[in-house]
Image: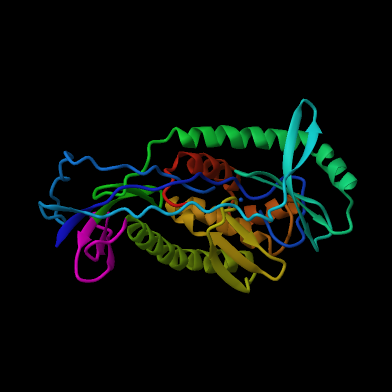
Amino acid sequence: MTAVKPATADTSQLDLFGREGQSPPRNVYTTPVWSVPASPSSSQQPPPVSPYVAPQVTPVPVKNRPLVAPPPDQPPKRQLMLGDFIVEYDLRRSTRKSIGFMIDDDGLRVTAPKRVTIAEIDDAIRTKQQWILTKLKERRERRAVRLQKPPVEWVDGTQLPYLGGEITLRLLVGGRNRSLYNPATRELAITLLPGASEEALKERVKSWYQVEARALFEQRLDLYAARLGVRYSAFGLTSAGTRWGSCTADRKIRLNWKLIYFSLPLIDYVVAHELAHILEMNHSPQFWANVGRIYPEYEEAKNLLRRRSQELPVLFP
């Protein structure tokens, strides 16, 4: 087999769960990823030989994704003066009973019942203006930090995050696609067909992450559900850009597969958090008491998860 040498990727990274002071009736609340295409120089030397790599390097051609224009019927953002700032927000109507706020990399999003007037929505935003302006400032600062990170290069030997540490990506060319992780050497060997694109490589790595995440998350959910004395009705993975997890009123839990980047204690915190919402669909003192019953160190884990999420490289859009 012959080692492969591709090129690169692009995007940003995740907030925490809820917004303090809210009690969402349906689900609970919580960042994306990026890298910049790198053109390999013709004078670039092949990577050193490893147990998985033959001396000669075969490049993987990069297929650029076409730019997609936003839908022409997308409604414009509304604007509201908050103190000295003009704040734009997306307004969405729903069947929920109260006005909800969410802040992500696209800014402020407001979800309101159909019966609520624009004036009432603007008044609700003014009431929450200190929280909104603070969160928007924090989001801008985190985004600026992410944009300063060096791009991830999708080449043989690249270091990838996994369970709180790093694993080494090994690229091979063979007769069929394979993904094989060696825990002893902490190497993930990806075998690609000749002429495979960088997008194909990234999809293979993402698929491997998701398989690992599903198996581990189900195991931890069963463990902590038994400790809390609750049952969840269904479990699924999500790629949400602003949530680590969610739990609906009918006990359906979804966890962001990118949690597989983090150490097991941080994964367990998110699992305990979402299971506790089966008992309390809010962030009240009783909710946190339930989290503390099965995960006493939740406050430390919550803060550490926020810091770690800002430090990680961005791998996938």
Query: Per the image, is 314 magenta?
Result: no
**Residues in magenta, as a range:** 171-197
Does residue 64 appear to the left or right of 244 in the view shown?
left
Does residue 229 appear to the left or right of 185 in the view shown?
right
Residue at (68% x, 51% y) in the render: 288
Query: In the rendered image, is residue 294 in sight?
Result: no
The quadrant of the picture occupied by the N terminus is: bottom left
Q: Position of residue 155 (x, y in %)?
A: 27, 49
Query: In the rendered image, is residue 286 in sight?
Result: yes
Does residue 31 appear to the left or right of 135 in the view shown?
left
Residue at (10% x, 51% y) in the render: 55
Q: Identify the residue at the far left of this view.
A: 55
Residue at (32% x, 42% y) in the render: 38
Decide which of 84, 66 is in the foreground and name it: 66
Q: Position of residue 44 (x, y in %)?
A: 18, 40
Does residue 137 appear to the left or right of 52 in the view shown?
right
Residue at (56% x, 52% y) in the render: 69
Q: Position of residue 58 (x, y in %)?
A: 18, 54
